[in-house]
Amino acid sequence: MKKNITTAILFQLALVVSVFGQINVLRVDNNSAPQTKDGIFYSLPRTVVNINVKIDQIENYKGPYADFALRFLGLKNVILTNSIDYKISDITITTYPEPDPDQYYFVELGDKVSKGEKSGMLSLSNSGIILGTLLESMETNKNFSHVAEAFESPEDTDKDAFGELFKYSADMSVFEKVDTIIRKINIDTMTVERQYYKRTMVEKSVEQKAKEAADFISKIKENRFNLLSGIQEVNYNKETLEYMDDRLNRMEKEYLKLFTGISVSKSLVFSYKYIPVPNQINTEIPIFKFQKSKGVIGLDDQGGKVVTIKVQRVGNTNTVENYLRKAVKDSKVQGFSYRIPELARVSLKVDANIQKETQCLISQLGVVTNLPANKWKVIFHEETGGIKGLEIQ
């Protein structure tokens, strides 16, 4: 069973800053030497790729009469040994933002706002990602919540499979055996025969019980045919007829399980986190191994098929990057930095076979640039760090 769990609600931090007062935005690194402590830090987001892999664990149980399935019922495709198999049933690829440790900035704030100056709101998420400098940005993610999915296991194909596994195998397994004993008694010249009956309880052999179960299956089929063909000449209403047919059908399936066996399925979900970086583009990165007999195993374990993730840039920001490279910077003071995210193709492979492929925006593969210092009224996309809205002064 799957259920949604709300794990966190993001709150925002608001600071009043001057529109016309002098501000300067500096990138923070190990070589930074700020001139003042009067300011605020913010970060741009990076994109994290989250992979959820759903594994079906299939437990196969041999029926107690499996060895007689072909002989008594003509069934060939039956479970002959107890085993556990695994298969990948679903893969989902999603993304979410987190602060990029390589993209932190310090906003140097100027003098306090005078009575004749305007002020604005600097809005940050609870993790320090910039949301904007307009009042609207305070409401952009007001109701944002991160939703995680949890899966409960086992998720059985037969809901009562464990509780009543092969329940009809518990039918009477002994029978009464009656032996007739004849004794001859000689009295003088006469011989008298007396009969005695010896009653004992004998356990049925597996073959005998299989034969009885097969005969009962044939009887159920005959009864269903008689019911549906109306041989009883009883005018049953529709609901009664459907109920009796359904009960007979269920009983037939339960007896068939004694020969075919039972498969029980459980759902297991594994989550993996991958952060794309520029030097791993177009490279297949292993994340785990999968083995049919064991399921998910570690990359260092022997055997199994390697599952890899590959990120490829589409190239939608190439033109912007070339333009910025040629542009001449004429000011030492800059405004807020923002991102233009790159569209990327993300694919998941099991050996050489693609299991899942999707396209998404990857912030850290795109371009980082900045606004002029005097045009800073802006709303950012929290997921990418790109500009959502801009008010030009």
Image (tube, rainbow, N blue to C red):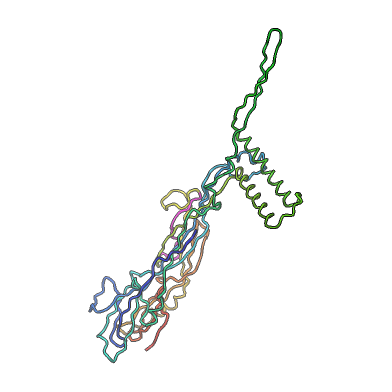
Place of residue 167 in the rendered image (x, y in percent of width and height, measured from the top left) = 57, 44
Front residue of this view, candidates 361 and 186: 186
Quarter location, residue 103: bottom left
Tally of numbered discs: 0
Where does the image place residue 331, in percent across and percent down from the top left? 31, 84
Residue in front for this viewpoint, 96 or 72: 72
Q: Is residue 78 above or below residue 134?
A: above
Outermost residue to the bottom: 116
The image position of residue 241, as x and y in percent, is 69, 54
Compared to 112, does 200 lie above or below? above
Which part of the image, by quadrant, shows the C terminus?
A: bottom left
State whether residue 366 appears in this view.
Answer: no
The magenta stretch is 278-292
Front residue of 368 and 212: 212
Position of 36 compared to 309: left or right? left
| Residue 361 showing in the rendered view | yes
Look at the image and say whether residue 289 sits in the magenta stretch. Answer: yes
